[in-house]
Image (cartoon, rainbow, N blue to C red):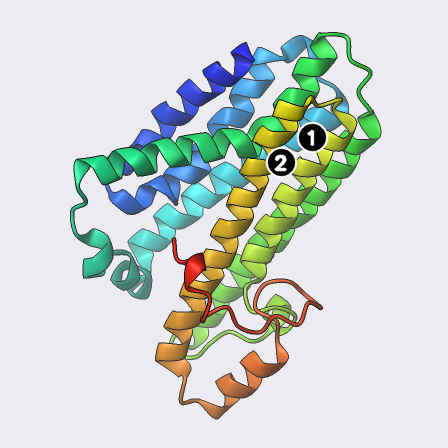
Amino acid sequence: MEHLWILLAVSFAVSAVGWIYFIYFFSIGYGLSISALSATTVILFYEQLTTPSIALLAVLFIYGIRLAMYLLIREKRSASYKKILYQPEISQRKPVFVMLMIWISCALLYVGQISPASFYLANMAEGAEVNELWMWIGAVVAALGVLIEAIADAQKSAAKRRNPKRFVDHGLYRIVRCPNYFGEVLMWTGSFLVCIGACCSVWQWVVAALGYIGIIYVMFSGARRLELRQTETYGNDPEFQAYIKRTPILLPLVPIYSVAKHKWLQA
């Protein structure tokens, strides 16, 4: 349990970048927090590290750094992204209490997300017979998710450079409309699978499950926001209408084509 307090302190410290600008709690602060928490887990459990645990934590560290750098570069170079990032409803100064609650929520969520690997190593340190196979499975699935997300981001950036006024419907976007979000869902699914072989107690399962459910909710919420923006921008385009009717919004092969009506996904 002690290691969770250390991870939480790190999460609070790094995610505090959100006090500079509100949206950073969920974007740059998120990426940097995941990287910092991964590195902290390595330091805390250096003696228990195995090849698959190093692989998983390296994947999460690289993911966080890549995400933070990608967002910083996009904020600097993309006029359309700046327009979204600094629109009035986002850039308007939030009350201190609201900022505080969001900071606390984000810090807790990020620790919950990273917790499966830390529970695996902590339980190993206490002599539990953990199953290394599930750490390998988690690392491979997580790495696949990061790869999908990176490819999706690159494909979208390239498409927008060619034609910034058209929606993206090639590459991974032929399979699912939000492949970057799907990649992240896959990554955190891999991380969560580690719990199966980690000899987790009930409370550890609860912490890990809350982190996993929380990020899945965030991904569907992000898909909903994107759907609403795209509908406003491309809604009158017959090609766009045909595209959204045949392409699932977030999960490949799962026939969920719209989440716009689900207001409970608003975050």
Question: Residue at left 53%, top 22%?
Answer: 39
Task: From the viewer's side, name the closer residue of 219 and 50.
Answer: 219
Question: Residue at left 42%, top 77%?
Answer: 163
Q: Is residue 165 visible?
A: no
Q: Which residue is mark 1?
A: 55
**CA neighbours of label 1 inside 10 A, class few (<14), some (14 to 19), many (20+):** some
* Secondary structure of the residue carrying numbered label 1: helix
Q: Which residue is mark 2?
A: 59
Q: Report the residue that reaches farthest toward the bottom.
A: 238
Name the side, left or right, on which 161 lies relative to 77: right
Residue 33 — which label? none
Q: Is residue 77 above or below residue 192?
A: below
Mark 1 and mark 2: span between their CA atoms? Answer: 6 Å
Quarter-of-image position of residue 248: bottom right
Q: Is residue 58 visible?
A: yes
Q: Amino acid at mark 1?
A: Ala
**CA neighbours of label 2 inside 10 A, class few (<14), some (14 to 19), many (20+):** many
Q: Amino acid at mark 2?
A: Val
Q: Are marks 1 and 2 in contact (CB under 8 Å)?
A: yes
Name the side, left or right, on which 131 lies relative to 117: right
- Residue 223 location in percent, x, y? 48, 62
Q: How many marks?
A: 2
